[in-house]
Image (spheres, grey):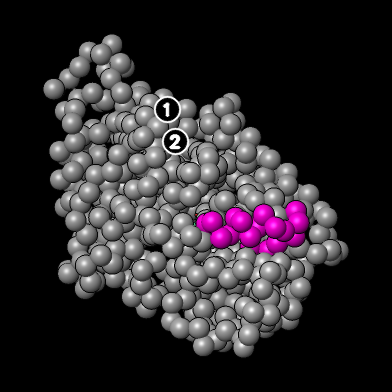
């Protein structure tokens, strides 16, 4: 079909393609966004490689069974060219030393994206920031490309401001504080806290020019966040970076029922067993008494650090759910730890149902690595957080939580902190225990922190309700795509 009349065009359902990056923390929210589009009647297709599709298929299947126009479309992961074994297609499946292989594999996917987008000719493409070439393909097809960072606008704006002014290169050491420019309030950082691509050469430095070209040619960015916490940065992002943005989150709140929550992020039977165990265990605990401790889908700790963490949780004296990802043996576990703490502490190995746990009434605080999704999920649940950033932009997210929103405390204040694993100092049990006490127990500002956290939780839930700011953000974005001048000029798949 070469063109359709205006009337027929507006009657035809909008078709949008979503292309998530090969990291769980990028895939989960972009699939949630695709589902939100589908819930508004947009025919939504998520382009995935087979092993990554398996992680989100339960979510997609549930949505499709409920009648939502959501589907996946597969393309091949370039395993052998990237030097990866078959079936290893996600950063979470690799030790940190090999994660660059996933970035390299991502660079090889351009021909598949090109082929599939030209074949199906969607009305818009929402692609992860890594897949910057989708801007040029979309331009060729005469349709808009939207970018997805899997981050809030605060860290995005901070990174852009640092690239623009380079204050971190003007200080004489990795530990000298500098002021982040262009923000409406003072935020200081040290070089050690920055992502590796801002500190010097990293495997992704070479792609930065392509990324910024892909960004500037995009219609704008789709953001898993909400205006009530980040509208000031959206204004600055538009004024200074000339980028438009649409808030549509927190998208985890779109996981409407317990079945949706159970389907999030895994098809593994062990994850289902963990879910049952976690929730029934939490059911035995008093309201707001439990700290949930989890560091995302791909963080790693040394055995020595895990041991301190175990001792710190024991010392704190509060009930806890602790998610331990490390597969490499358990020699670090203190002698008799689980037996001693039976009934007070639950250690989950592998995947926990994080959003369901955070939303459980027994949970009163969250110790987190400050991955963007975790920050947002903690805020949505109205919980105070103990922050322990480890890599990428997580120190920026910590600044937002601790200094701007003031709903958290630093868990790892005393030890040397930084984004490079070899630079990080050991955080001792006493410090970890004290941080748990500050968010779960009393403390100088515990009341104020808890009250603010609850208020942000309420705002987050309001934002995604019909008429809320993010609900409206999605309406505006869909209208913008619908009104795109060349819509309808392609073939319908
Ligand atoms: N997550 C989960 N269970 C786990 C670990 C992680 O459900 O055991 C989810 C978590 O809810 C979040 C995502 O995985 O949605 C992790 O994203 P985040 O940005 O917090 O961290 P990353 O994994 O990207 O470092």
Image quarter in which the C terminus is found:
top left
Dot label at residue 1: none
Q: Is residue 241 magenta?
A: no
Q: With respect to residue 153, does 351 lie above or below? A: below
| Corner quadrant of residue 17 | top left
> Residue 126, image x and y in percent?
35, 42
Residue 362 in view, yes or no: yes
Image quarter in which the N terminus is found:
top left
> Residue 41, image x and y in percent?
38, 26
> Residue 320, image x and y in percent?
67, 67
Residue 144 in view, yes or no: no
The residue lying toward the viewer, choosing from 51 and 162, is 51
| Residue at 55 percent of width and 86 percent of height | 332
Dot label at residue 36: 2
| Corner quadrant of residue 414 | bottom right
Per the model, the C-alpha gap separating discs 2 and 1 is 7 Å
| Residue at 53 percent of width and 40 percent of height | 257
| Residue at 36 percent of width and 72 percent of height | 94
Magenta stretch bounds = 275-292
The residue wearing badge 1 is 40
Q: In the displayed image of the protein, which residue is found farthest to the right?
A: 444
Q: Residues within 10 Å of mark 1 (few under 14, many from 20)?
A: some
> Residue 310, image x and y in percent?
63, 79
| Corner quadrant of residue 467 | top right
| Residue at 25 percent of width and 13 percent of height | 8
Mark 2 touching mark 1, by CB under 8 A?
A: yes
């Amino acid at each position: 079909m070469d063109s359709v009349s205006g009337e027929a065009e507006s009657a035809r359902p909008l078709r949008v393609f979503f292309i998530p990056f090969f990291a769980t923390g990028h895939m989960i929210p972009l699939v949630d966004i695709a589902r939100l589009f589908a819930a508004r009647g947009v025919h939504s297709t998520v382009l995935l490689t087979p092993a990554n599709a398996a992680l989100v298929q339960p979510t997609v299947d549930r949505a499709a069974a409920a009648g939502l126009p959501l589907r996946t479309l597969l393309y091949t992961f370039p395993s052998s060219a990237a030097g990866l074994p078959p079936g290893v297609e996600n950063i979470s499946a690799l030790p940190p030393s090999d994660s660059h292989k996933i970035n390299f594999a991502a660079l090889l996917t351009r021909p598949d994206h090109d082929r599939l987008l030209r074949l199906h000719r969607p009305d818009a493409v929402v692609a992860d920031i890594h897949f910057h070439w989708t801007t040029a393909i979309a331009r060729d097809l005469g349709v808009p490309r939207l970018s997805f960072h899997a981050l809030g606008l605060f860290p995005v704006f901070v990174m852009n401001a640092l690239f623009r002014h380079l204050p971190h290169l003007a200080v004489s050491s990795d530990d000298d504080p500098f002021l982040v420019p262009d923000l409406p309030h003072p935020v200081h950082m040290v070089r050690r806290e920055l992502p590796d691509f801002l500190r010097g050469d990293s495997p992704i430095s070479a792609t930065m020019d392509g990324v910024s070209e892909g960004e500037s040619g995009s219609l704008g960015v789709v953001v898993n966040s909400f205006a009530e916490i980040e509208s000031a940065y959206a204004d600055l992002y538009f004024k200074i970076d000339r980028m438009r943005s649409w808030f549509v989150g927190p998208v985890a709140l779109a996981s409407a029922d317990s079945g949706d929550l159970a389907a999030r992020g895994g098809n593994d039977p062990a994850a289902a067993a963990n879910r049952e165990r976690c929730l029934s265990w939490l059911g035995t605990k008093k309201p707001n008494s439990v700290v949930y401790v989890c560091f995302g889908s791909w963080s790693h700790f040394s055995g020595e650090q895990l041991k301190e963490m175990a001792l710190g949780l024991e010392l704190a004296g509060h009930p806890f759910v602790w998610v331990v990802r490390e597969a490499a043996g358990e020699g670090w576990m203190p002698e008799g730890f689980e037996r001693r703490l039976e009934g007070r502490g639950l250690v989950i190995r592998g995947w926990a149902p994080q959003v369901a746990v955070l939303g459980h009434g027994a949970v009163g605080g969250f110790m987190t690595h400050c991955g963007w999704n975790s920050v947002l999920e903690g805020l949505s649940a109205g919980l105070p957080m103990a922050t322990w950033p480890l890599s990428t932009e997580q120190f920026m997210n910590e600044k937002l939580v601790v200094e701007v929103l003031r709903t958290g405390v630093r868990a790892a204040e005393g030890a040397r902190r930084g984004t490079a694993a070899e630079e990080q100092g050991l955080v001792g049990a006493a410090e970890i225990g004290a941080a748990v006490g500050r968010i779960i127990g009393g403390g100088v500002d515990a009341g104020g922190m808890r009250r603010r956290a609850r208020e942000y939780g309420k705002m987050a839930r309001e934002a995604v309700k019909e008429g809320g700011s993010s609900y409206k953000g999605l309406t505006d974005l869909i209208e913008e795509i619908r009104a795109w001048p060349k819509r309808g000029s392609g073939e319908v798949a």
